[in-house]
Image: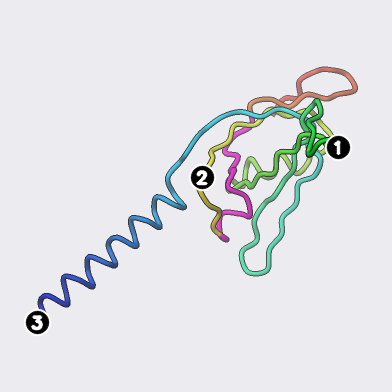
Amino acid sequence: MKRFLFYVIGGVVLILLVIFFIRYYFVLGEGAKAGELNYFVKKGYIWKTYEGRLIQTGFKPQNLGGVQSNEFQFSVTDEKVAQRLMISSGKLVELHYKEYLGAIPWRGYSQYVVDSIISITDPTTGNRVPF
C-alpha cells in the first residue's frame, strides 16, 4: 500500500512539473517587433523586472467606432539589453522576442520576453544608433 501511494504521489508531482514547464518555460513563438520605445522601467515588489512598451505605427480599431494605437508590452531578462533600452526611450527600435504561454513573477509581467535588440534608429536624423 505504501509503495502504491508513493508511485501515485510521485506521478502527480511529475505531471504537475511537466505542466508547469510547458506553461511557463516552453517557447510558443519567436519574432520581431518594431516601433517607438514609449517607456522602459525596472519595477516590482519582490522581483525587480524590466518592463517596456513599444508603440507600433498604424492604428487598429479596438471596437466598432474606436481607434487605438498598436502597443507591444514586453519584459526583458538580460541586463545588457535592459541597460541599452533604458537610454533609448523615444527612439525607433526593432526587438527580437520570445512568446511564452504564461508570465512568471521573476521573469516579468508579460508573456513576451525581449532577448535581443536588432536595431535602434534616431527618428530625428534617421540614422542607426550604434550599440
The CA span between labels 3 and 1 is 63 Å
Q: Nearer the viewer, residue 44 or 63?
A: 63
The residue where tag 3 is placed is: 1
The three-letter code of the residue at mark 2 reads Tyr
Relative height, residue 76 to residue 45 (above, below): above
Which of marks 1 and 2 precedes in the sequence?
A: 1
In the rendered image, residue 50, in percent from the top left (x then y), is placed at: 67, 51
Q: Secondary structure at mark 1?
A: loop
Q: Position of residue 23 (x, y in %)?
A: 44, 52
Mark 1 — residue? 66
Give the vertical position of 81 relative to 95 (above or below).
Answer: below
**Mark 3 is on which residue type?**
Met
Q: Residue at x 62, y 50 (%)?
A: 110
Q: Quadrant of residue 106?
A: bottom right
First in residue order: circle 2 vs circle 3: 3
* Residue with the mark numbered 2: 100
- Residue 114 figure quarter: top right
Regarding mark 3 in the picture, which secondary structure is present there? loop
Q: Nearer the viewer, mark 2 or mark 1?
A: 1
Where is residue 49 shown, x and y percent of the image? Answer: 64, 56
Crowd class of label 2 (few under 14; some 14 to 19; many from 20; radius 10 Å): many
Going by the picture, which residue comes out furthest to the top? Answer: 126
Residues shaded magenta: 105-117
Residue 57 percent coordinates (x, y):
80, 26
Label 1 amino acid? Gly
